[in-house]
Amino acid sequence: MGAWQSYRLRLKRRRFLFRAIRKRRELRPVTNRTKRIKPGDILLFSTQRNEAIRLPYFLKYYRDMGVNHFLIVDNDSTDGSVDYLADQKDVSLWTTPRSYKRSRFGVDWLNWLQMRYAHGHWTLVVDPDEFFVYPFCDTRPIRALTDWLDASSIKSFSAMLLDMYPKGRIDAQPYRAGQDPLEIASWFDSGNYSIQKNGLFGNLWIQGGPRSRVFFKDMPERAPALNKIPLVKWNRRYAYVSSTHMLLPRGLNQVYDEWGGEKASGALLHTKFLDTFTVKAMEELKRKQHYAASMEYRTYASQLQKDPDLWCKWSEKYINWRQLEILGLMSKGNWA
C-alpha cells in the first residue's frame, strides 16, 4: 500500500474515533459497574434491542467460556430486557433511544465504550444471537486462547459467521428463554461460500450459506458478509469500520496466511433463524434502521411468507468445532 493510501486510512480512523467521542452523548448509563473490571479481564461488548428471550442463555454461554464482564448498549427495548440486564452483577448497561442507523449500526457506540474501558483488554464483540467457537473450546476456556495469542504476538482473531437453522419450518418449534438455540437451529451449509480480498482494508470478504442460497439467490453479490474479527486485544486507537467485518489500523484485518499456510481461526454460530425471527424481521422492516433501507429485512420478510424452510439435502448437522475444521470453515493453525 502506498503512502497516500496509508495516510487516508489514518485520517479515516481518526474520523471514526472522533465520531465515537461525539456519539457518547447519546448513551445514558443504567448500571455502570466498570470499576469492577480488573486488569487482564476479558470483556464482551454488544448492542441489543428486544432480545430478552435470548439473554439468559447468551450470558450463561459466555460466562462459562470465561468472559469476565459484559458492556451492553440497549437501543430502546420495550420487552423488559433493560431490567433483566440491570440486575446482572457482571453487566454494565447503557441505553439510548437514538438512531441505530445514524450510529453506523451501533458501531460508534461500541467504539466509544471500547475506547473508554477496553484499552489493554482482550475484547469480544458479538450479537445476542452469535455464539463464538474456537479450536479446543470444548476443553479450554477463552483465556487459554488469548494467552496463546499474547504469546504469539497476535492482536486479532477471526471467526466466520455460520448461519444456523432448523430442519423444517423455522417457526415449527418455539424457542424458550434459557434454552440453547442450537437445540433447534442445529443445521448449516457446509459449502457454497465465496471469498475475495478487500484491496483497501486488506480483509477477506466472505459470502454464501443459506442467506445467499435462499434469500439472495438472484443477487448473491448482495448477500450479507460472513467475515468477522470479533476478538481483539484492544487499544484505544483502534476502531471498527463496519460491524466487526473490518478494523483500523489495517494490519488487524490480516488474520489469514497468504503463503499457503493456515492461521488459527474460529466461527460464530449465528442462531438468527428461530421461530422469533419472523416477528423480528417485520419489526426491523418497519423501523428501517438497517443497511440499505433495510433491504435485507425486506428480502427476509418476502421469502419467509413464501417458504419458511432453509433446510436442503446438502445441509449438515452441527457436531463440534472439529467438524468445522475438517470442512475448512475454521482452523487451529499452529495452536496445539
Image (cartoon, rainbow, N blue to C red):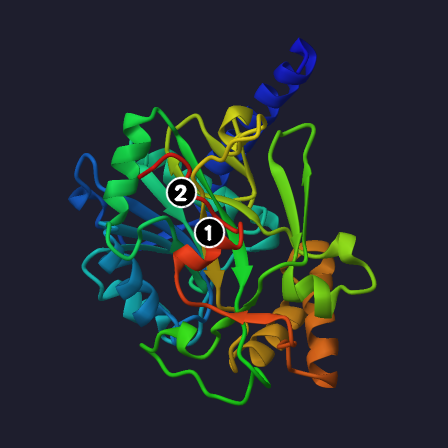
Q: Residues within 10 Å of mark 1 (few under 14, many from 20)?
A: some
Q: Is residue 97 above or below residue 117?
A: below
Q: Do the residues labelled 2 and 1 touch (CB within 8 Å)?
A: yes
Q: Is residue 235 above or below residue 29?
A: above
Q: Nearer the viewer, residue 63 or 29?
A: 63
- Please name the amino acid that badge 2 sits on: Lys
Q: Which residue is drawn at 36% across and 54% down?
A: 72
Disc 2 element: loop
Answer with the quarter of the image where residue 165 lies: bottom right
Question: Do we see residue 95 in this rendering?
Answer: no
**Left or right: 53 in relation to 300:** left
Q: Which amino acid does label 1 sit on?
A: Glu
Q: Where is residue 73 in the image (x, y as percent from the top left)?
A: 40, 55
**Earlier-in-chain disc, 2 versus 1:** 1
Name the residue at the bottom extreme.
172
Q: Position of residue 148 (x, y in %)?
A: 28, 34
- Image spot of residue 254 (x, y percent): 53, 30
Q: Which residue is drawn at 71% across and 84% down?
A: 307
Q: Is mark 1 on a helix, strand or loop?
A: helix
Which quadrant of the figure contains the N terminus?
Answer: top right
Q: In which quarter of the image is residue 168?
A: bottom right
The residue sitting at 38% across, 28% down in the picture is 154
Q: Which mark is residue 274?
A: none
Say the numbered circle drawn on residue 325: 1
Residue 46 drawn at (x, y percent): 41, 53
Kindly identify which numbered label has been placed on residue 332: 2
Q: Quarter holding the C terminus?
A: top left
Asked if residue 291 lies left or right of residue 280, the reply is right
Question: How many numbered discs, if any?
Answer: 2
Name of the residue lying farthest toward the top: 3
